[in-house]
Image (tube, rainbow, N blue to C red):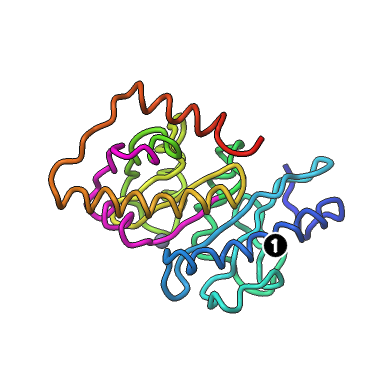
Amino acid sequence: MPAVSEVPASMREAVDAAKQKVADLHAELPRWGLVVWTAGNVSERVKGVDGAPDLLVIKPSGVSYDELDADAMVVTDLKGELVEGTRSPSSDTAAHAYVYEHMPEVGGVVHTHSTYATAWAARGEEIPCVLTMMGDEFGGPIPVGPFAIIGDDSIGRGIVETLSGHRSKAVLMQNHGPFTIGGDAKAAVKAAVLLEEVAKTVHVSRQLGDPLPIEQRHIDSLFDRYQNVYGQH
Ligand SMILES: [Zn+2]
């Protein structure tokens, strides 16, 4: 699809709504203790209308969380090229864009260096599925993605290769930290919050001895129930 140099009029309303939503969701990262300073980012896909390509909304690079209102958000295409905004996009934009480009079902992406999840990432060890809430939200263990350094598409590729065909909405990029995905940005933020909680709890459990595994058939039924039945319908 051709590149766009500005937000098409047909997508104006959806882009503005996404800017507000993504700005509000950024406030959840410090609120849940997932980020320090300007680290971390939330993005959301805006579906293309009338043949226009999809866009994404993300925060600008290196701006304090206190300043992240809807107007501060930036819009890029799925190559990470700036389409709208007065500041440069987050340095992780290329990774987010790569995920949207290659996983069409994903509508939201979150990246943090939250302490416990990143501690597991530093050891390159998957988090075993030993909590029912892990079965519910992630459907199994949290996988580890490859070591990759910012600058090309290797982080995005590592996320996509690890999560494609995997139930988990979270990947621990080795020596770096977690990326989470969801149907929209809110679902990806929820996964980031729950990931940090389970990373912490399993770590604490490990200090006491060996956590007990959950049988696969139970994990399967937890995942099925939580994803398809639980909550308000
Ligand atoms: Zn990072």
> Depth check: 188 or 231 in front?
231
The residue most toward the left is: 209
Badge 1: residue crowd in 10 Å (few <14, some 14–19, many ≥20):
many
Q: Position of residue 231 (x, y in %)?
A: 58, 38
Residue where numbered disc 1 is placed = 19
Ligand 1, what quadrant?
bottom left
Apparent side of residue 109 relative to residue 201 in the rendered image (left or right): right
Q: Position of residue 228 (x, y in %)?
A: 56, 29
> Depth check: 6 or 20 in front?
20
The residue most toward the top is: 217
The residue most toward the right is: 9
Q: Looking at the image, is 55 positioned above or below residue 132?
A: below
Q: Looking at the image, is 141 positioned above or below residue 9?
A: above
Please report the bounds of the magenta region as a residue range. 109-133
* Kind of residue at badge 1: Lys
Is 111 in the magenta? yes
Residue drawn where x is 53% and y is 78% of the image: 64
Is 140 in the magenta? no
Apparent side of residue 170 relative to residue 119 in the rendered image (left or right): right
Q: Secondary structure at mark 1?
A: helix
Residue drawn where x is 66% and y is 65% of the image: 74
The number of numbered badges drawn on the structure is: 1
Residue drawn where x is 66% and y is 67% of the image: 73
